[in-house]
Image: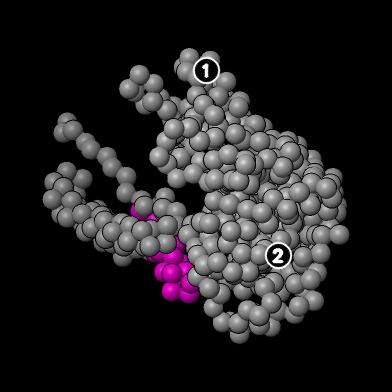
Amino acid sequence: MTVTTDTPADGHSLVGERGQTDTHAISLNGKGDWIVGDDALIFAPGRVVSILDRSRYRSPAFLALARVAIQKVVSDPGPLRILTGMPSAWFADGEARGQLADAVRAAAAPLGEASVTVAPEAAGVYYAWLFESGRLDLIRLAQTVGVIDAGYRDVNVALFSGGRYVGGESVPGGTHEALKDIKRLIATTYRMELSLHEVDAAQRTDGLIVEGMRHPMPGGTRAALTRSLSTVVATGKSLWPNGGRALHAVVLGGGGAAHLAEALGREFPQLSALENPQLAGARGFLAMATAATPGRP
Amino acid sequence: MAPRRSFTLAMPDSDPRSARIWQHLSRIGADADASAELRALICAALDQTARLDRIEDKLDQTTRLDRIEAKLDQTARLDRIEDKLDRLIDGGVVRHDLSPPPPPSPSPSDSLIDPAIIATMLDFG
């Protein structure tokens, strides 16, 4: 069985400590009971945990979140092959990599013994592009490509050549930062205090309800969603050979991809924006984990 | 002067129903009351759209893929519907939900992936 994990960029990577509810909870021996995702937003909105720095890997909240994610995709107990990602900026931190692998192994333990590989987050988007047709594309594999993974915490910019990870950077400006800006704009314009997941829902539907009436998103929303653009472009031009001009493709994925695609396409004409970008990383890791599993048919 | 009514109908020139509408418009005089026949032609075109809507709804319920935005660009729309059908039939690696994935299916080309390539792809230094 192969499993892939990736952090959704939609604000659902939320875990709440369980209150007096009957909802399904994850019980961690000695580390409390936890409810995850929409349940956390409904039943424990005041006690939501969303840890964005690398200390998350030592938190029982992360363990609970990873366990639910694995349970969603694993149907039968047994040995597991798990491929997951972490931001490029942390990837050189061997201790953090070890903690992430340990946490994922512990999360999977009730289902089976797991062999865990930790990759730079952008690798998932790269693999999604390589396996886009459903098969490993050997022509793409031989190429030198830039990858932009516009995630929730940050934006990962990476370089791959001949299938090999060459290097990468994480830059601020993930969807989380944009949502905080939009939250302030909504507070100023409509005098409403929304949580970040409510802001996320509003911007996805391009409007919000105020006193029973639907209103447009406040001015400045679009700018907030693309604020990281100049940093991402500068990082790419710095990291990639010849400022990116020599690349065969610049592959774009992640939850923030939709907002950046048009402008990035003007900077990098060879841009390849993946379909359904929010789950591109997860799709790529799944394809790669499947291909890397010994004994597969 | 009689009131005039303007409308916009976006369909590719290559669509045979566009041709019929243009032909009809070019035939009628400036003051002729063409509304009945024109309405019939447009309804015929829109009936196709309603039918595509129903087909796509059924596909979306199965594949959970994104909805198509260009409702009246029938050619592009049919291309994308065909793509959705292909994915459904092929059961390709691209998945758009987090339900348990099916067991890996035998694939002649998968077995050709050199283990050394896999090792390179998973070598992060």
Residue B34 visible from this viewpoint: no
Q: Quadrant of residue A151?
A: top right
Residue B59, by quadrant, is bottom left
Q: Position of residue A99 (x, y in %)?
A: 76, 49
Specify start and end residues of the magenta stretch as a single range.
B72-91
- Residue at position x 46%, y 40% in the image: A39
- The answer to whether residue A210 shows anywhere in this view is yes
Local secondary structure at mark 2: strand
Quarter of the picture holding the N terminus of chain A: bottom right
Locate the C terminus of chain A by quadrant.
bottom right
The chain letter under disc 2 is A
Q: Is residue A52 above or below residue B73?
A: above
Q: Which mark is residue A187?
A: 1
Query: Up-down: is A167 above or below B83?
Result: above
**CA neighbours of label 2 inside 10 A, class few (<14), some (14 to 19), many (20+):** some
Residue at the location (66% across, 36% down)? A51
- In three-dimensional space, the C-alpha distance between marks 1 and 2, rounded to whole angstroms, equals 46 Å
Please determine whether, in this image, residue A225 is positioned above or below residue A213.
Answer: below
Q: In x, y percent, where is residue A226?
A: 63, 35
Left or right? Give the position of A211 relative to A179: left
The residue carrying mark 2 is A115
